[in-house]
């Protein structure tokens, strides 16, 4: 591991400006990757007077997320920076609060919930209605994917959809919520980068966006609280609705809202970002597109079930490869809860343990790890779904995190994304990419493609 470089930037301010510059140019992920290549796969630097470790070593990441899980947490900074919008929940808490939040959230992602593709088909049809059928007009799929997954996720969580695909009036409450939701997420990502300095430059636009988002959700929470009172009197229970189940066990409406927002953000982002990146890559590679279309054609137009999707080998390879090259959360981090060591990265040869003091932050880059040529081969930068034919990865492949905090909604994201891809290919025989440039990052809480994913779709 290289020495701590402070003599050029002893306060760690210059590096912060450099990171912000890279972010503005949509090159932060590649910049971090070059730092690993120029230094080592585990190094430390100073950011705003804090000595900050970075790693893309599978063994270190495994220690942080699993084998030494109790020694690392998301840290108080994450809670403080996300508090204006999300409060306490599965995304922002550690210890007992996190365990309680995960126990509350888990039932929403059991197989019966994830496999309800008939409900999802309704939202796919709403999206399909907005796609031109003349085979000539361009369409921007990324925004449509975001709306579709917000509609489906809101129905799953709230019990009724926001219907952003069918509400064309920007003054409609759901449209205002969607706009405020987007603003607040972008600002949350900036607050993460600023760490403890986030509140020094808190914007009114951000606070207003948080207020709009929370007020909108509060109306659903109030409705669920009233439903709880009715159910307690009658003893009758309807179908499973996440919000209503929360209201049955939590008396505080603010706490219910916090849990709801902690699930809504990753649930929507996981599916829409995976979809956008997959279609972007497949539309640019006719060889891959043809093989996928052949696999879809074997279904004879029958809508895929949960089990069918699990057995579609090439579709699975494509989504695996998409998540390898463009993981949904490409940068993440933890804070040491006690003095601890990481397995490798220290000493002259980088093979000795690394000491991490209590309170120090350790960031890890799945983006850089997923592109290491010593792990994935000389073609690590290329989109090659066939590499998954015999690949059984371990901790070198973490598209949905790992350990006890592994993404609880990963099966939902894979199922909804796979279903959408199959249904698109059942409706359109050609998907022609109109994006001439290479994939470019749009980094917020999750990492999406910056391009609109412009395509021309030719129906059968």
Image: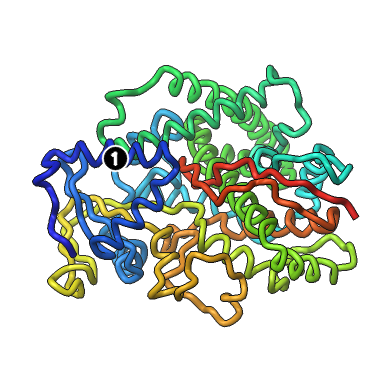
Q: Nearer the viewer, residue 411 or 40?
A: 40
* Quadrant of image for the C terminus: bottom right
Give the residue at the far front of this rendering: 436
Tell me which corner region of the image, top left, top right, bottom left or bottom right, holds residue 224.
top right
* Quadrant of image for the N terminus: bottom left
User: Residue, x 72% and y 36% (percent of image)?
Assistant: 160
Looking at the image, residue 127 lies above or below residue 55? above
User: Residue, x 58% and y 37% (percent of image)?
Assistant: 247
User: Residue, x 55% and y 51% (percent of image)?
Assistant: 438
Where residue 151 appears, as percent x and y from the top left, is: 70, 38
Determine which residue is flagged by label 1: 18
Tell me which corner region of the image, top left, top right, bottom left or bottom right, holds residue 384.
bottom right
Q: Secondary structure at mark 1?
A: helix
Where residue 344 appears, as percent x and y from the top left, is: 23, 71
Residue 128 horizontal side relative to residue 373, left or right:
right
Residue 188 horizontal side relative to residue 143, left or right:
left
Residue 417 horizontal side relative to residue 295, left or right:
left
Looking at the image, residue 228 lies above or below residue 400? above
Looking at the image, residue 337 lies above or below residue 243? below
């Amino acid at each position: 591991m290289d020495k701590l470089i402070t003599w050029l930037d002893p306060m760690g301010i210059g590096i912060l400006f450099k990171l912000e510059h890279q972010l503005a140019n949509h090159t932060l992920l590649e910049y971090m990757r070059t730092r690993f290549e120029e230094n080592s796969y585990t190094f430390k630097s100073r950011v705003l007077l804090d000595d900050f470790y970075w790693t893309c070593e599978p063994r270190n990441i495994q220690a942080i997320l699993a084998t030494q899980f109790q020694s690392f947490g998301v840290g108080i900074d994450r809670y403080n920076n996300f508090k204006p919008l999300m409060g306490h929940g599965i995304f922002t808490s550690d210890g007992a609060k996190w365990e309680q939040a995960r126990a509350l959230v888990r039932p929403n992602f059991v197989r019966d919930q994830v496999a309800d593709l008939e409900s999802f088909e309704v939202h796919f049809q709403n999206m399909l209605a907005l796609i031109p059928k003349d085979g000539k007009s361009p369409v921007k799929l990324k925004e449509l994917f975001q709306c579709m997954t917000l509609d489906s996720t809101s129905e799953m969580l709230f019990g009724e959809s926001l219907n952003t695909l069918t509400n064309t009036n920007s003054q409609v409450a759901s449209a205002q919520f969607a706009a405020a939701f987007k603003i607040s997420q972008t600002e949350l990502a900036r607050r993460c980068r600023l760490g403890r300095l986030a509140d020094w430059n808190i914007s009114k636009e951000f606070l207003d966006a948080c207020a709009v988002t929370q007020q909108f959700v509060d109306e659903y929470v109030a409705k669920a609280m009233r439903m709880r009172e009715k159910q307690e009197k009658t003893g009758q229970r309807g179908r499973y609705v996440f919000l209503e189940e929360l209201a049955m066990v939590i008396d505080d409406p603010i706490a219910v809202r916090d849990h709801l927002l902690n699930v809504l953000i990753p649930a929507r982002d996981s599916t829409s970002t995976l979809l956008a990146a997959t279609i972007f890559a497949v539309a640019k590679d006719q060889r891959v597109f043809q093989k996928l279309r052949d696999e879809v054609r074997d279904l004879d137009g029958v809508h895929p079930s949960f089990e069918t999707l699990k057995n579609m080998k090439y579709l699975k390879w494509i989504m695996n490869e998409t998540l390898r090259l463009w993981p949904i959360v490409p940068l993440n981090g933890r804070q040491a809860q006690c003095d601890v060591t990481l397995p490798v990265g220290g000493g002259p040869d980088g093979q000795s343990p690394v000491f991490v003091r209590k309170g120090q932050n350790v960031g890890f880059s799945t983006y850089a790890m997923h592109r290491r040529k010593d792990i994935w081969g000389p073609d690590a930068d290329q989109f090659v779904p066939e590499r998954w034919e015999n690949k059984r990865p371990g901790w070198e492949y973490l598209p949905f995190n790992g350990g006890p905090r592994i993404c609880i909604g990963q099966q939902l994201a894979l199922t909804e994304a796979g279903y959408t891809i199959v249904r698109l290919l059942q409706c359109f025989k050609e998907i022609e990419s109109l994006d001439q440039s290479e994939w470019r990052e749009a980094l917020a809480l999750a990492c999406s493609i910056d391009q609109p994913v412009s395509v021309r779709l030719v129906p059968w």
